[in-house]
Amino acid sequence: MASLFKDPSKLSAYRDRRFPGSQEDFEHALLTSITVYVGNMSFYSTEEQVYELFSRAGEIKKIIMGLDKNSKTPCGFCFVLYYSREDTEDAVKYISGTILDDRPIRVDFDWGFQEGRQWGRGRSGGQVRDEYRTNYDPARGGYGKLVQRE
Ligand code: GTA
């Protein structure tokens, strides 16, 4: 079946500031990638749970949990690598929005995992967007890290 994901501008709203190439390279990577990023996860969701859920889209090559760079504990995201592009697209199509540990997770195409990308880039060690969060979210460490410092 022809791919539904042909327009690179519609593949992802996210642009990685640290991607090493041009916009064209980035779009090509998104169109061919076999990696998805999973966001809005509970800090308590495990690799085993991710494996069970994402196996529904196809055989998984590898899972990389996103970690707080200071505490080295899960900080709410991960990368899932498949063997085939079709399975990758199915994960985005069918698993995004699924509830995992009471949270609707977000599944996004990713340009490809590289060593170092598993670490949160926020000043406190976790994810950047989590630091600006102003709501109280017990499964995400309470208030956003910047709010906690105020
Ligand atoms: N494929 O959506 C994604 C995605 N996200 C959110 C992170 N990663 C993603 N990959 C894909 N799709 O490897 C990847 C990153 C990295 C790892 C951890 O996860 O490529 P991070 O989340 O800690 O940092 O990354 P990142 O991605 O560099 O930060 P982001 O989300 O672009 O930061 C900007 C966001 O933070 C803004 O959208 C905004 O919501 C918030 N923000 C930033 N600055 C401010 C500010 N001054 N005020 C308010 N909000 C702000």
Image (cartoon, rainbow, N blue to C red):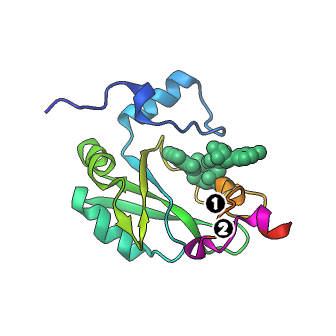
Q: Residue at the spot x=42%, y=73% of the render?
A: 47
* Residue 17, magenta (yes or no): no
**Is residue 35 depicted above or below 10 in this figure?**
below
- Where are the magenta residues, as a range? 137-147
Q: Residue at the spot x=38%, y=32% of the render?
A: 31
Circle 1: is it few (<14), some (14-19), or many (20+) Cα within 10 Å? many
Q: In the visual, does 49 lie left or right of 15?
A: left
Q: Where's residue 91, x and y in %?
A: 30, 51
**Mark 2: which amino acid?**
Asp
Residue at which label 1 appears = 119
Say which label, 1 or 2, has the lower sequence index: 2
Q: Is mark 1 within 8 Å of ligand 1?
A: yes
Q: Where's residue 113, x and y in %?
A: 50, 50
* Residue 142, magenta (yes or no): yes
Residue nearer the viewer, 42 or 121: 42
Residue at which label 2 appears = 68
Find residue 3 and report its image quarter.
top left
Q: Quadrant of the N terminus?
A: top left
